[in-house]
Amino acid sequence: MPEEMNDKEQWIIDLIRKNPYVSQQELAEILGLSRPSIANIISGLIKKGNILGRAYILNESQQVICIGGANIDRKFHIKEKAQLGTSNPIYATQNAGGVARNIAENLGRLGMDVSLISTSGADKDWSVIEDSSSLYMNLETVTPFPEKSTGSYTAVLDATGELIIALADMEVYEAITPDLLRKHDVLLSRSKCIIVDLNCPKEAIQFLCSFAYSHDLPIVLIPVSSPKMNRLPDNLDGVTWLITNRDESETYFQMEIKDEEDWKNAVGKWLALGIANVVITNGKQGSMIGNKKEGIFHVPPIEVDEVIDVTGAGDAFSSAVIYSWLEGKSLIEIANTGSMNASKTLQSSYTVRQDLSAEQLQKDMEELS
């Protein structure tokens, strides 16, 4: 039985009843509210059972679904030599971050239709993320938990930019459970591609891999750090892409990648587990990419004269790999596109480069050739 509604909720219900295809922006203009406020009210009505879904879901184009972290990235830059046990003069920066969110913004800027499935607090941090993300992705699929804090990553850097300590509060993502994901089964079943990062609990990742396999959907797994490699599903057969780095692969296979042969062998080990396509990045050494059909190739990096900020470069690489794969490119083209987007992001002070578009990425690739 649906719950009782307040006045704003009743107004929205009345307007939707008159026009089931009304957009959130139209509702916002009629009621004099912001579009994010309308999105929150509609999300609440869906949870209460007053709205069963969007009338126009059948008419929407296939979406790319990104699932995982959407957090605030804070950096505290110590101006002089760091001293423990006392106050250090700093300057601070803050951006929207999170692997799944960063990938969603990259893909949104590249013109793809993207939805983000994540969890958040009902706090100011989420408002900051929402304001900087809503142009590039659908956020109606983010579930707020008022008793929890929005995810955050806080880094303390010395005067040279080296990390002193980092603090990660990712507890809110433990609420990305199979039950929560089942609420989005219609959206997931009609998706173009599912991308999931390892901020999600292992049981959620295993559920998504099984779901993708049973619905014949492509699924991309994005590790976020070596300690979270134990969240990979026990069975990787049927995974479409794994985009990982050297450290994460070394951790998973308990091996050391000392040279190019080890690196190539590590890609082969992943492919032998049933993953269709694999990339292992290795910083300034470039990437190793492969599948069973085309083989395994080393792709050199794109040289960068000046690195402004490394934040988001890995997510830029992953995004461009996914984008160019969906565009039907060859493995070497895919790896080169990933390297290009990463190199341009390294030269930007933003987590997601502000000039990114499908046209700009095409121009970047033309310069490379």
Image (cartoon, rainbow, N blue to C red):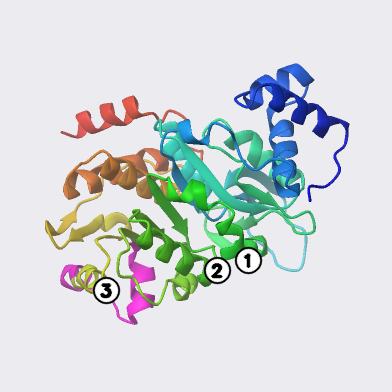
Q: Are marks 3 and 1 in contact (CB under 8 Å)?
A: no
Q: Which residue is mark 2?
A: 201
Q: Which residues are magenta?
A: 244-264
Disc 3 marks which residue? 273
Q: Is residue 263 magenta?
A: yes
Task: Give how far apart the Cα atoms at labels 3 and 1 are.
Answer: 27 Å
280 over 194 or under it: above or below: below
Residue 88: mark: none
Per the image, label 3 sits on a secondary structure element best described as: loop
Up-down relation of residue 238 to residue 188 (above or below): below
Residue type marked 2: Pro
Q: Position of residue 23 (x, y in %)?
A: 62, 24
Q: Is residue 147 left or right of residue 325?
A: right
**Coordinates of residue 112 in the picture (x, y in percent):** 41, 34
Q: Amino acid at mark 1?
A: Glu
Which residue does the numbered mark 1 point to in the structure image? 174
Q: CA distance from mark 1 to mark 2?
A: 6 Å
Query: Mark 3 packing: few (<14 Cα in 10 Å), some, or many (20+)?
Result: some
